[in-house]
Image: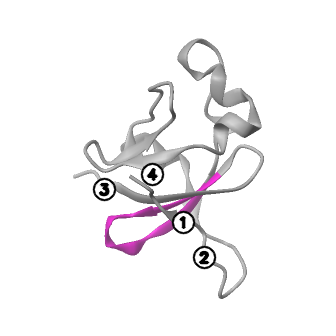
Amino acid sequence: MSKDVISVGCPDGHQLSLVFEGGERREIDMADLLAFEGIFAPPADPAFFRRVEVNPDVGTIIWLNGADVCPDVLYERSHPFQGPAGVEPARPSSR
Protein backbone atom coordinates (compact mmCIF):
# COMPACT_ATOMS: atom_id res chain seq x y z
CA MET A 1 0.00 0.00 0.00
CA SER A 2 1.45 3.36 -1.00
CA LYS A 3 1.61 6.39 1.25
CA ASP A 4 0.44 9.76 0.01
CA VAL A 5 2.63 12.83 0.23
CA ILE A 6 0.87 15.33 2.49
CA SER A 7 3.46 18.12 2.65
CA VAL A 8 6.46 19.30 0.64
CA GLY A 9 9.25 21.78 1.17
CA CYS A 10 12.19 22.87 -0.97
CA PRO A 11 15.09 23.65 1.35
CA ASP A 12 17.84 24.06 -1.27
CA GLY A 13 18.56 23.46 -4.94
CA HIS A 14 16.64 20.47 -6.24
CA GLN A 15 16.17 18.90 -2.83
CA LEU A 16 12.74 18.26 -1.40
CA SER A 17 11.63 17.54 2.11
CA LEU A 18 8.50 15.42 2.20
CA VAL A 19 5.98 14.39 4.80
CA PHE A 20 4.05 11.22 4.06
CA GLU A 21 0.80 9.96 5.56
CA GLY A 22 1.36 9.02 9.16
CA GLY A 23 3.84 11.88 9.61
CA GLU A 24 6.98 10.17 8.26
CA ARG A 25 9.48 12.84 7.19
CA ARG A 26 11.84 12.07 4.30
CA GLU A 27 14.29 13.91 2.01
CA ILE A 28 15.18 13.46 -1.64
CA ASP A 29 17.49 15.13 -4.14
CA MET A 30 15.39 15.26 -7.30
CA ALA A 31 18.50 15.92 -9.43
CA ASP A 32 19.40 12.28 -8.75
CA LEU A 33 15.96 11.15 -9.93
CA LEU A 34 14.99 13.39 -12.85
CA ALA A 35 16.65 13.95 -16.22
CA PHE A 36 15.03 17.45 -16.41
CA GLU A 37 13.91 16.96 -19.99
CA GLY A 38 10.48 16.73 -21.60
CA ILE A 39 7.78 17.57 -19.06
CA PHE A 40 10.51 17.80 -16.41
CA ALA A 41 12.49 20.49 -18.30
CA PRO A 42 10.76 23.45 -16.56
CA PRO A 43 11.58 22.17 -13.03
CA ALA A 44 15.28 22.35 -13.98
CA ASP A 45 14.95 26.09 -13.30
CA PRO A 46 15.33 26.48 -9.51
CA ALA A 47 12.68 29.23 -9.34
CA PHE A 48 10.15 26.99 -11.10
CA PHE A 49 11.23 23.96 -9.06
CA ARG A 50 10.52 25.77 -5.77
CA ARG A 51 6.88 26.20 -6.81
CA VAL A 52 6.25 22.50 -6.21
CA GLU A 53 3.04 21.70 -4.36
CA VAL A 54 1.15 18.71 -3.07
CA ASN A 55 -1.93 17.72 -5.03
CA PRO A 56 -4.08 15.99 -2.40
CA ASP A 57 -6.34 14.51 -5.09
CA VAL A 58 -3.49 12.30 -6.31
CA GLY A 59 -1.40 12.25 -3.11
CA THR A 60 1.84 13.42 -4.64
CA ILE A 61 3.86 16.46 -5.65
CA ILE A 62 3.09 18.45 -8.77
CA TRP A 63 4.50 21.46 -10.60
CA LEU A 64 2.53 24.14 -12.43
CA ASN A 65 3.13 22.51 -15.82
CA GLY A 66 1.49 19.26 -14.65
CA ALA A 67 4.68 17.29 -14.03
CA ASP A 68 4.32 14.92 -11.10
CA VAL A 69 6.16 11.97 -9.57
CA CYS A 70 4.59 8.77 -8.26
CA PRO A 71 4.50 8.81 -4.44
CA ASP A 72 5.85 5.24 -4.38
CA VAL A 73 8.93 6.37 -6.31
CA LEU A 74 9.39 9.35 -4.00
CA TYR A 75 9.19 7.11 -0.95
CA GLU A 76 11.52 4.42 -2.31
CA ARG A 77 14.16 6.89 -3.54
CA SER A 78 14.08 9.17 -0.49
CA HIS A 79 15.72 8.73 2.89
CA PRO A 80 14.62 9.59 6.43
CA PHE A 81 14.88 13.27 7.34
CA GLN A 82 18.32 13.97 8.83
CA GLY A 83 17.95 17.68 9.53
CA PRO A 84 18.68 19.39 12.81
CA ALA A 85 16.28 18.87 15.69
CA GLY A 86 13.45 21.38 15.77
CA VAL A 87 13.68 22.20 12.06
CA GLU A 88 10.55 21.50 10.09
CA PRO A 89 11.36 19.70 6.83
CA ALA A 90 8.32 20.80 4.84
CA ARG A 91 5.67 23.45 4.59
CA PRO A 92 1.99 22.57 4.32
CA SER A 93 0.64 22.51 0.79
CA SER A 94 -1.20 25.61 -0.28
CA ARG A 95 -3.71 23.55 -2.25
Which mark is first along the chain, 3 or 2? 3
> As shown in the figure, which amino acid type bears the numbered disc 3?
Lys
Q: Residue at x 30, y 50 (%)?
A: 56
Which mark is first along the chain, 4 or 3? 3
Q: Residue at x 55, y 44 (%)?
A: 52
> As shown in the figure, which amino acid type bears the numbered disc 4?
Tyr
Which mark is first along the chain, 1 or 4? 4
Residue under label 4, please give it.
75
The image quadrant that residue 72 belongs to is top left
Range of magenta residues:
16-27
Tag 1 near tag 2, CB within 8 Å: yes
Between the C-alphas of marks 4 and 1, the distance is 18 Å
Residue under label 2, please give it.
88
Crowd class of label 2 (few under 14; some 14 to 19; many from 20; radius 10 Å): few
Between the C-alphas of marks 2 and 3, the distance is 20 Å
Q: Is residue 71 above or below residue 45?
A: below
- Secondary structure under tag 2 reads loop
| Nearer to the camera, 36 or 80 | 36
Residue under label 3, please give it.
3
